[in-house]
Amino acid sequence: MPHNKSDAFLSVQGLAVEYSSSGEVIHAVNGVSFDLKKGGTLGLVGETGAGKTTIAKAIIGILPRPPANVSAGEIFMNGRDLLKVDNAQMRKVRGKEISMIFQDPMTALNPIMRVGEQIAEAIFRHEQVTKKQAEDKGKEMLEMVGISTERYREFPHQFSGGMKQRVVIAMALACNPSLILADEPTTALDVTIQAQVLDMIRSLKNKYGTSMLMITHDLGVVAEICDDVAVVYAGEIVESGSKEQIFTSPKHPYTVGLFKSLPDINSDMERLNPIDGLPPDPSNLPAGCSFGPRCPNFSPKCQDHIKLKDAGNGHFYRCW
Amino acid sequence: MSQAPSPLLEVRNLKKHFNTPKGLLRAVDDVSLTIEKGKTLGIVGESGCGKSTLGRAIIRLQDSTSGEIIFNGEDITHAGKKRQRWINENMQIIFQDPFSSLNPRQTLEETISEPILISKRFKSKAELLKETERLMDLVGLDRRLRRAYPHELDGGRRQRVGIARALSLKPQFIVCDEPVSALDVSIQAQVLNLLLDLQKAAGLTYMFITHDLSVVRHISNDICVMYLGQLVETSPSKELFKKPLHPYTKALLSAIPSIDIYHQRERIILKGELASPIDPKPGCRFASRCLHAREKCREPQRLVEVLPNHYVSCWRAEAL
């Protein structure tokens, strides 16, 4: 995506991340660029192992190094390159300016710490407040996500999955961050609870004008909550554009295949149309287009380097 | 449900209760259903509604508290050890998580052929190998993976191993317990198509347990919606999606995130969460979350045939 500094709040340029283990190099993220508008929601869509979570971890600076290594790229937030910020500074950014909602609320909370204290801890760390003030703010946050303050002193195991995810969201929002990285925040939840949580995320986001990067594999969630979409395959963005562009006129064969393979709740068709084959091995990516081996329109030219193509109005795709 | 011409499986008033320190947990509470030969019955519900317990009780992985399970005209509810062997050969299960349902120390060949070995249904080693290879071909596993261990395979392939193992004794009936929930959409479609093909080829009967309504519509002839251990609605699958009657079914359907960005359904956001199945109050178990609850909902409800073959356990269903 071309760089447009003016309206981008977060701008990732040419990000590449590798993991190395016992001599093997795994190319998890290969030159990813995207912009997130202020107050906007960008959906990062892709399957398991596409590199979505690695991108988020690189932004918030929690990649385990080693084995991970950011081999190229820049991540600008408010004009500052986050990759050049040192650890001590980054610790102040995390939880305050950027926070992350993790996929699995069962493991994201400390099992032997009262839930209220986990929320208050973030506030106490980052704001100039007394313990008492942090606790009051923590209770306020609990109420905001729809949990009674009576449960402030309970432990995570006393909460259901949906409630735990609310606590995780309360923690993420506690210091009123300007950017939220939501990594599959509703994947572990039941549909009726997912609807509740998405509804809550949406209204809180609107209230505070927070920008959000929504990582998901669920196109339905994207349709519901995102403004823009970037489709990730084998560590590359293969298509990006507004939600309307991607959902009504997908251009890349992988995006088209994803939509086709969904069982449609409104039709009576018998067989599904899966994408043949499996995602490529990230330690041994094919030359040229990484979707080539699974693509129904494959031709030898696909093995050359594929440039981004402009479909107009900010809609780009990586296929000739 | 109505008397089907030749039900392969009939379950009458099945109950499975567990004694817990907090009281009696009614995981499955008075469930009756029938499945015709060669058909698929979908069981839909959220985590903790008892759908997996129901599946396990039916194939007698667990003893039921009361009720009858009639398979092929024979009451198998209290089958002895000898008869259990026959049941195991005719009723099989595919588990949700292909990562934990395979023995990590067994090769694919060992896993797939183990049931045949135990049933002594082979004459020579060569025959056993031939049969294993036939099963691997059937589910689309490459023969050279014969000596591979589960950790070498991705989720989709592991699930194919689970399917091959379930098919190894040529059962008539298979309980599919969330067989595609752990898989990515493009792989999910591959496995669903495989299940449909196998059903056509061998006349298999499925009970398909899932929380994913779009998947269940695609694969089932009839659907039962389950809530806190009880069936709240059963209907032919097309009709259920066209004309859901129970308030819970309506909420469940409306909560599915739709990929149609221009025609978003009006969402019904339910209050609260699943109540506890321990010592539930008499009356409709959904009443505490229901938007239409009335005083009369506290009286016991039963399934009533409102439309041909369409049963619902809500006295207000027709009025709503």
Image (tube, helix red, strand yellow):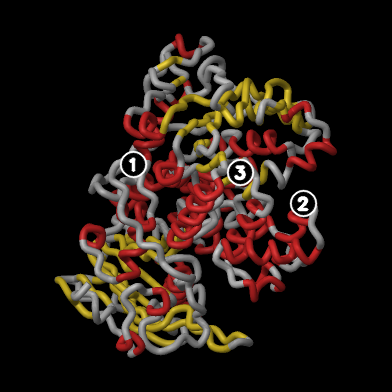
Asked whether residue B124 appears in the rendered view, the answer is: no
| Point 35% across, 57% down: residue | B267
Is A230 displayed left or right of A160 in the figure? left
Chain at numbered mark 1: B
Q: Tell me residue A229's x, y (percent).
A: 46, 33
For marks 3 and 1, give the CA distance.
Answer: 23 Å
Q: How many neighbours does mark 3 have within 10 angstroms: few (below 14), some (14-19), or many (20 or more)? A: many
Distance Cα–Cα, label 2 vs label 1 = 40 Å
Chain label for disc 2: A
Q: Estimate how packed mark 2 is, as few (under 14), some (14 to 19) or many (20 or more) residues with alpha carbons within 10 Å.
A: few
For the N terminus of chain B, give its image quadrant.
Answer: bottom left
Please name the residue shown 33% across and 59% down the image: B253
Judging depth in this view, the residue of A63 and B176 nearest the camera is A63
Instruction: Please state, as top left, top right, bottom left or bottom right, where the C terminus of chain B lies in the image.
Output: bottom left
Q: Which residue is mark 3?
A: A180
Decide if residue A172 is on the left or right side of residue B55: right
Q: Which mark is residue B261?
A: 1
| Numbered disc 2: secondary structure | loop
